[in-house]
Image (tube, grey):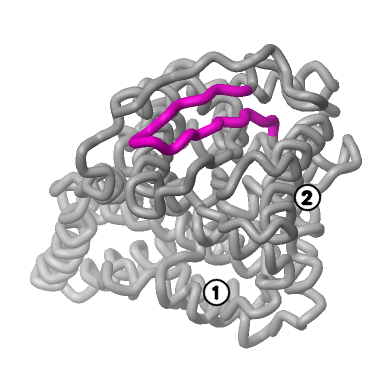
Amino acid sequence: MALTSDTPATDAGGPPQHLRREVVVDGTRITLLGTAHVSEQSVTDVSTAVASGQHDAVAVELCASRYSALIDPDSLENMDLFQVLRDGKAGMVATSLALGAYQQRLADQFGIRPGAEMASAVEGARHAGLPVFCIDREISITLKRIYRRTPWWRRALLLSGLVTSVLSRESVSEDEIERLKEGDMLESTFAEFAERSAILYECLISERDQYMAARLAAIARTQRPAHIVAVLGAGHLAGTEAALTQPPEDADAVCRSLDQLPPTNRWLRWLPWLVAAAVLGGFAYGFSQGVDKGIELVTAWVIINGGFSALGALLAAAHPLTVVTAFVSAPLTSLNPMIGAGFVTAGAEIWLRKPKVSHFRSLRSDVKQWTGWWRNRVARTLLVFVFSTLGSIAGTYIGGFHVLQRLLA
């Protein structure tokens, strides 16, 4: 059972009422404190609240991975690029860096570090000897749910929004920073599309509201603190408060449900295999019509598929031998969807231009500027992976249609 309670307009030195909500869940008082993720005032509000001595637990809008990055800024120095590639996480790491670059650009403009209000909450809790609970869903799961639930023809729009946020050089006004309190950092990055997409809004905001409310309810029932202060983006205040007024009976089940990834469309899963089978079948049929015909089809496939992947590697400013590797490997990897061209080309780039410790150390600062993605060897390796993969995908379908067209000619 949960109850809401009224609060005064402000506490001494605290935030205004519209950024502060209170709910009681099973005897535990939960104060929801809304912040803007790059606002100096939010840092002050959080530090004042945590230091007030009124709370015996602190919850933050962070997942485990973002919490680790916050308390260990040098964690990227220990990143194993080969492991990232093997685990298929290169695209996710690149996306996280792009989002971080957007946040860092805003923070630098106003002289504070990204997530300073969350860092203030964590540091204040440690100083006061209070437990800290991470209540947000893993960012990788949120992004994957967005990707899988978004129709394939609209995914390019999401990518363009992310790219625009990285490449934009426009300054942001103080008023615009304060308007970030109406959303959160992820939502603001995709703001143009979030307004028109129910799926995007649900994954970015609504689901996370439910997730954080369920986590807070579970903490209240299992840990039984008397008073929790939960620091979260102000755009989550209303939704989280509403979810807490009727907390789920099985909060863990809610979190498990929201952590599950939607299944990929069956036809999309089988399409690469069908294309590969069709191309191989086309080769076989071409050779049955004559050796010259078969060689013509194979040559066209290699040039188109390898050419597009090599072009992607070239756009990423890959090493010349990496570009050659893309041209040679893509026609082969495209016929075996278990192995991606990006894995091969990124591996070649690492071997030819092994990143130094300094590149890992400067990664976050370098990617703030779009030129830094090409200057930093770690970021450039990720670009090689992404661009050569996209090139190979384009080459696979264009080359496949070309083979079919030549057979029907």
Q: How many marks?
A: 2
Q: Secondary structure at mark 2?
A: loop
Where is residue 343 drawn, in percent x and y?
A: 46, 73
Q: Residue furthest bottom?
A: 351
Look at the image and say whether residue 263 sits in the magenta stretch.
no
Identity of the amino acid at label 2? Lys
Identity of the amino acid at label 1? Ala
Residue span colored magenta: 20-36
Q: Give whichever of discs 1 and 2 has the lower sequence position.
A: 1
Where is residue 341 drawn, in percent x and y?
A: 43, 70
Q: Nearer the viewer, residue 247 or 81?
A: 247
Q: Main secondary structure of the magenta part?
A: strand
Q: Is residue 144 left or right of residue 247?
A: right
Q: Secondary structure at mark 1?
A: helix
Q: Which residue position is annotated with label 2?
A: 368
Q: Is residue 33 left or right of residue 47?
A: left
- Count residues near mark 2 (Cα–Cα under 10 Å), then give few for <14, some for 14-19, many for 20+: many
Q: Residue sitting at 67 percent across and 71 percent down?
A: 76
Q: Nearer the viewer, residue 106 or 39?
A: 39
Relative height, residue 195 to residue 393 (above, below): above
Q: Residue sitting at 59 percent across and 58 percent down?
A: 67
Q: Is residue 260 left or right of residue 236?
A: left
Residue 102 seen in the figure: no
Q: Residue sitting at 39 percent across and 28 percent down?
A: 206
Q: Which residue position is annotated with label 1?
A: 346
Look at the image and say whether residue 31 sits in the magenta stretch.
yes
- Marking on residue 287: none
